[in-house]
Image: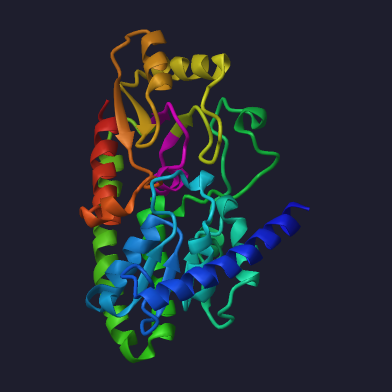
């Protein structure tokens, strides 16, 4: 029933979007897509930034649209009429393919451009996609999910990022075959930077006196933790909609701080510090610091215009990780 209702809404969105598109075209709005350029639509910031690096000097020859651009959490995103219209008429559409993208399948069935190239990045990862894990101490009831699912925060692994950039490069080469070699050169240059960042993470973790992270928040960093052989504890899973941790969970995390002598508790960029503050105040030494890792789920277009990049945010995460593991 829900899928049928959503399909009707999508059809209405496309009709309204078409009308809006015609009006925008007649008024020559500077925000309207340029029909003379190939149109690329992506769902989340990391994909958008990867595309910018792969297109490089040719970025101005394409229309590149980021759907989730307002800073709203990935798990709460709902496409607007303009989003559906942009997707329906684009030449290349790239999305993560996780639980939060369930709306995409119906949107694609309604798409006007039946020849568009569609990339599901979780499918592209294949066996590298990881099943979401419940951190120790967390039960399925607290997590809010009925069964196992794959962790959709695939961009929080620079190794995944390098692999996925090659997938995106193949798509660009198909879309614009005349300049395929240039895109491949751009990809090699960018993935070389990602490989250097990967080496930095490896060095930091290998040299660290502890390899344990404690998240007083959600846990979207499964890929990062697994890439470098770390251990993590968390108040919630990566995709949890919960905002209040149970008394038992708080007590468990306080016990881990005391048992392991942890000097740092981690929160996400979009979260608050209430749980972290409680854990620290209830711990034996009460002197742990609160550090912030950036999951890139709240990046806005204003951030992009101000120079925020995937590589830069992962560099910042590396510095935070080094501090968190210093203990």
> How many numbered markers are drawn?
0
Residue 221 drawn above or below residue 232? below
Position of residue 127 in the picture relative to residue 232 (left or right): right
Q: Residue 50 appears at what percent x and percent y? A: 33, 64
Dividing the picture into quarters, in which one does residue 271 lie? top left
Asked if residue 228 is among those painted magenta in the image, a careful observer would answer yes
Pick the residue in front: 28 or 107: 28
Q: Residue at x 56, y 66 (%)?
A: 16
Inspect this view and state whether residue 209 appears.
Answer: no
Position of residue 252 in the picture relative to residue 38 (left or right): right
Q: Please say which color scheme the image uses.
A: rainbow
In the rendered image, the residue lying farthest to the right is: 1
Residue 32 drawn above or below residue 97? below
Which quadrant of the figure contains the C terminus? Answer: top left
Position of residue 321 in the picture relative to residue 170 (left or right): left
Q: Residue at x 53, y 36 (%)?
A: 237
Q: Residue at x 65, y 59 (%)?
A: 9
Inspect this view and state whether residue 153 appears.
Answer: yes
Q: Residue 134 appears at what percent x and percent y? A: 57, 35
Pick the residue in front: 226 or 110: 110
Pick the residue in front: 5 or 253: 5
The segment highlighted magenta reads: 213-231
Q: Residue at x 21, y 55 (%)?
A: 307
Q: Residue 176 appears at what percent x and percent y? A: 38, 86
Asked if residue 312 is among those painted magenta in the image, a careful observer would answer no
């Amino acid at each position: 029933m829900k899928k049928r209702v959503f399909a009707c809404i999508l059809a209405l969105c496309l009709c309204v979007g078409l009308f809006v598109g015609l009006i925008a075209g007649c008024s020559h709005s500077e925000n309207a897509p340029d029909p003379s350029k190939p149109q690329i639509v992506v769902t989340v910031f990391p994909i958008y930034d990867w595309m910018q690096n792969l297109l490089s000097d040719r970025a101005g020859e394409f229309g590149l649209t980021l759907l989730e651009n307002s800073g709203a959490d990935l798990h709460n995103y709902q496409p607007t009429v303009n989003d559906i219209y942009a997707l329906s008429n684009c030449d290349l559409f790239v999305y993560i393919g996780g639980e939060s993208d369930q709306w995409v399948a119906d949107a694609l069935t309604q798409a006007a451009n039946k020849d568009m190239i569609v990339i599901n990045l979780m499918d592209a990862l294949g066996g590298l996609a990881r099943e979401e894990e419940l951190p120790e101490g967390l039960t399925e009831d607290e997590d809010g999910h009925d069964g196992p699912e794959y962790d959709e925060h695939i961009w929080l692994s620079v190794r995944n990022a390098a692999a996925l950039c090659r997938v995106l490069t193949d798509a660009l080469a198909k879309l614009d075959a005349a300049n395929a070699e240039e895109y491949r050169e751009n990809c090699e240059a960018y993935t070389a930077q990602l490989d250097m960042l990967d080496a930095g993470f490896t060095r930091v973790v290998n040299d660290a006196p502890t390899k344990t992270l404690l998240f007083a928040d959600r846990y979207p960093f499964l890929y990062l933790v697994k890439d470098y052989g770390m251990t993590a504890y968390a108040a919630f899973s990566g995709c949890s909609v919960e905002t209040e941790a149970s008394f038992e969970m708080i007590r468990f995390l306080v016990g881990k701080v005391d048992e392991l002598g942890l000097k740092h508790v981690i929160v996400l960029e979009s979260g608050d510090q209430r749980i972290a503050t409680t854990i620290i105040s209830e711990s034996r030494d009460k002197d742990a610091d609160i550090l912030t890792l950036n999951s890139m789920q709240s990046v806005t277009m204003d951030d992009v215009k101000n120079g925020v990049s995937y590589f830069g945010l992962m560099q910042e995460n590396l510095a935070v990780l080094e501090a968190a593991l210093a203990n």
